[in-house]
Amino acid sequence: MLCLQTEVTEKTATGYSGVQIALHWLVAILIVAAWFSHDGAEAAMETLEKGGTVGFVPHVAFGMAVLVLVLLRLVIRLRRGAPAAPGVPGSLAVRAADWGHRILYLLMIAVPLGGISIWFLGMDNGDVHGLFGTALLLIALGHAAIALYHQFVLRDGLLRRMMKAE
Ligand code: HEM
Ligand code: HEM
């Protein structure tokens, strides 16, 4: 079995805390919910453009929840740290994992901010927002596939890090 223990670097913890784990899964669910509810936001925009009024828009609520929880998650991560990616420190795989996570964080913040610019500031950039929103979902899917590859092909127990608090 491949050992997950890696060299201790800055901001390294031995594992994710219960709060970090809960936030990871909650945010994942909210991103999927935001993506699948985008039709409602587009319909709401059309109604508003025609001078109508709209009530509760699930897409906006899911997306705003993503932003708030990701900012919280980032603060916790910066203060508490996260376990180093498995593998040889500095190797291509470890650097790819770190950059993959950074890109996910960047998109989890940038996509809702783009949504805010449309919904609250009336800017006309629905296409860009949609493109990056879909990129976020696809990169997250790739990330999930890699996690499952670690768990079931490499059998290094990676998934357990996001299941059991340490
Ligand atoms: C929208 C969906 C998802 C997003 C945005 C996402 C994002 C992230 C991010 C940013 C990290 C880095 C650790 C942190 O600071 O929280 C992470 C870790 C992790 N994620 Fe996800 N994730 C998603 C879905 C999933 C799914 C579906 C799985 C499992 C099949 C998964 C498994 C893991 C595992 C095992 C780790 C720990 C990796 C490590 O310790 O090196 N994630 N995720
Ligand atoms: C992770 C969070 C989010 C994801 C993944 C996401 C994804 C998407 C996608 C894929 C579209 C379709 C765009 C198109 O094809 O035209 C869309 C539209 C839209 N989103 Fe989001 N979004 C998120 C957060 C937000 C937030 C926080 C808001 C508002 C505060 C928002 C407001 C809107 C609006 C108003 C539209 C319709 C744009 C138009 O019709 O021009 N979104 N979103």
Image (tube, rainbow, N blue to C red):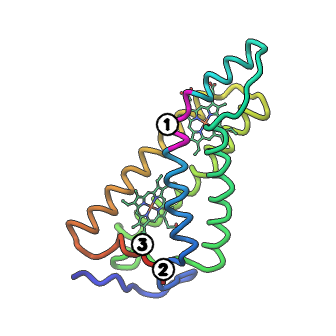
Figure quadrant of the N terminus: bottom left
| Residue lying at 48% horizontally and 79% vertically, measured from the top left | 165
Task: Label 3: state its secondary structure.
Answer: loop
State yes or no: discs 3 and 1 in contact (Cβ < 8 Å).
Answer: no
* Quadrant of the displayed image that contains ligand 2: top right
State the separation of the CA atoms marked 3 and 1.
Answer: 25 Å
Magenta stretch containing residue 22, yes or no?
no
Residue at the top extreme?
Answer: 50
Would residue 71 appear left or right of 15 to someone viewing this image? Answer: right
Q: Is mark 1 within 8 Å of ligand 2?
A: no
Give the numbered dot on residue 163: 3
Q: Classify mark 1: residues with Cα within 10 Å, few (<14), some (14-19) or many (20+).
A: few
| Residue lying at 50% horizontally and 77% vertically, measured from the top left | 16
State the separation of the CA atoms marked 3 and 2.
Answer: 7 Å
Q: Amino acid at mark 2?
A: Ala
Residues in magenta, as a range: 33-39
Residue 49 vertical placement versus 108 (above, below): above
Q: Amino acid at mark 3?
A: Met
Q: Classify mark 2: residues with Cα within 10 Å, few (<14), some (14-19) or many (20+).
A: some
Task: Label 1: state its secondary structure.
Answer: helix
Q: Is mark 3 within 8 Å of ligand 1?
A: yes
| Residue lying at 72% horizontally and 39% vertically, measured from the top left | 116
Q: Amino acid at mark 1?
A: Phe
Task: Label 2: state its secondary structure.
Answer: loop
Give the numbered dot on residue 36: 1
In the rendered image, residue 69, in percent from the top left (x then y), is placed at 64, 59
Residue 44 vertical placement versus 155 (above, below): above
Residue 119 vertical placement versus 147 (above, below): above
